[in-house]
Image: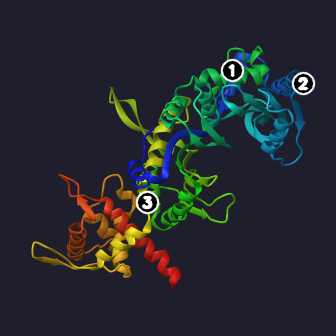
Amino acid sequence: MKTPKQFLAKFNDSIVATLGCFDRVIFKGYLPLGGNEYLNIWIDRVLMIQRKDFLPRVQPMSQQLVDEAQQQAKKAGAEYRYLKGRGKKERIVDEIARQRRHPEGLLAVLCCLETCRTVKLRWDKNHPRITFTRRLQRVLYFYYLDPEFGRMFVRLETWFPFTIQVYVNGHEWLARQLARQRSGFVQHDNAFTELDEPSVAQELADRFVRLSWRYQLNRWAKIVNPLLQHEWFRDMQYRWVIDQSEYSTDVIFRDRASLAALYKRLLDHAVINFSAQDILTFLGRRLQHRFDGEVLTDCKKDRWPGARIKHRMKNNWLKMYDKFGQVLRIETVINQPREFKVRRKRERKGVRQLVWCPMSKGIANLYQYEAKMQDANQRYLNALSAVADPAPAYRQVVSLVEPKVVQRRRYAGFNPARQQDVRLFAAVLRGEHLLRGFRNTDIRRHLYGETPCAETRRRQSAAVSRLLKRLHVRHLIKKIPRTRRWQLSAAGEKVLGTSVRLYYRDLTQAA
């Protein structure tokens, strides 16, 4: 796992360990029947039956799946329950597991009605045609306590085309691997609050992406769907995709007091300083005029058991929250992988070469998911490293006010209570500069906006150069060698970050 070095170095005295691990991963399986055209060709040429006879032949299969699920539950001594209305499935299964004292194997089978994808018969110019549609149908949830993956479930839609969904949790899987290695740990829910050997835990967590996922998923599909033995589907296997993936970076603190003293400031810093461009940067994107979507931040401080902040880019998001008051969790969730670019070999003008392509949902890309989410978590934590114990930083803010003399030249100080100076600090602190630094042009645009007049732009650029020089002589920013770019120094992150927080939060509250 890539480690957030800046964050860890700053809060090393309070941190016990870090752990990067997949959390919730949802796989979805589709029978390889394509769209409407391919489905009708399959019925005509493979099954060789009339289209009007297809639905009467396939409808009894739904009841067959339900009957088989009931038989499996009875054989395993598990409960089969039909749910009416909206029930909390996890709570029901928790209660059943406690009553049965958490046996391994099948815990329960729940059946409920949901609107899902299926097929219907349409008439097109007096010709029957089978098309995909959405209808209410019975859905089966098979809950297991798997010896390898812990608590998991498999969801099976009982109407054709029998789409399947598999839910696993990386922390549950890791707990069983640690137990096999006899490496001590304390687990609460889906988080580890204590690890005897953090390096061993991280090494095991990194193996999750390299498991034989196709084999595992096909094995579960055969258990819950006996129709795969039917002559129609005997030569078929599900095509598996990643429907949702979560990857968390947990920072385990020594005690609750250490995290409690810091967490509120982390939330305030994220709310005040992280803009839409910052969120895109954390997720490996740049804000362009072609970007069609929303970037939103939502912070809830009245949430139990703890406050959390969520940054959303379309249907992907970054979250920060605390687990049990002792673990700081940064979590990236990917639902739309095509918003991320990866390098792939493609043929261009008759030559195979590496090009940037949108990331797809195929399970072979799980390692790409891991890399993207690790990077996002690392950037987010490093951006939070500007927050620290405020007392030393407040004392250093005083140095901003005093003039600085370098080589007999006097450089004016800054006023942390002056809006124009704080806008400069906020512009330099923007998360979009975390990867490549910033130029004079970047700061000028943040301070003055787009200016059509070339002469005005020249004067604004000269003014920004003087401001950057005043920051440079105080060692708050430093030049990136052989470029025209600047980057924040460690002192700059601390002092400027504290100044922005002081202005936007503490002074506002005092007023």
3 or 2: tag closer to the N-terminus: 2
Q: Residues within 10 Å of mark 1 (few under 14, many from 20)?
A: few
Question: Which numbered mark, 2 or 1, is in the foreground of this view?
Answer: 2
How many marks can you see? 3
Q: Residue furthest bottom?
A: 511
- 340 sits to left or right of 160: left
Query: Which percent across, then down, holds residue 416?
Result: 36, 78
Which of 258 and 386 lies nearest the eye of the viewer?
A: 258
Q: Which residue is drawn at 80% across and 40% down?
A: 94
Q: Which residue is drawn at 89% across and 36% down?
A: 81
Q: Mark 2 points at which residue?
A: 74
How far across and how far down the image is residue 125, in percent? 75, 35
Regarding residue 421, the answer to whether it shows in the image is yes
Pointer 2 or 1: first along the chain: 2
| Residue type at numbered disc 3 | Gln
Instruction: Report helix, strand or loop for mark 2.
Output: helix
**Left or right: 416 in relation to 455:** right
Residue bearing mark 3? 277
Q: Residue 480 appears in which quarter of the rendering?
A: bottom left
| In the rendered image, the vertical position of residue 56 relative to residue 197, given as above or below | above
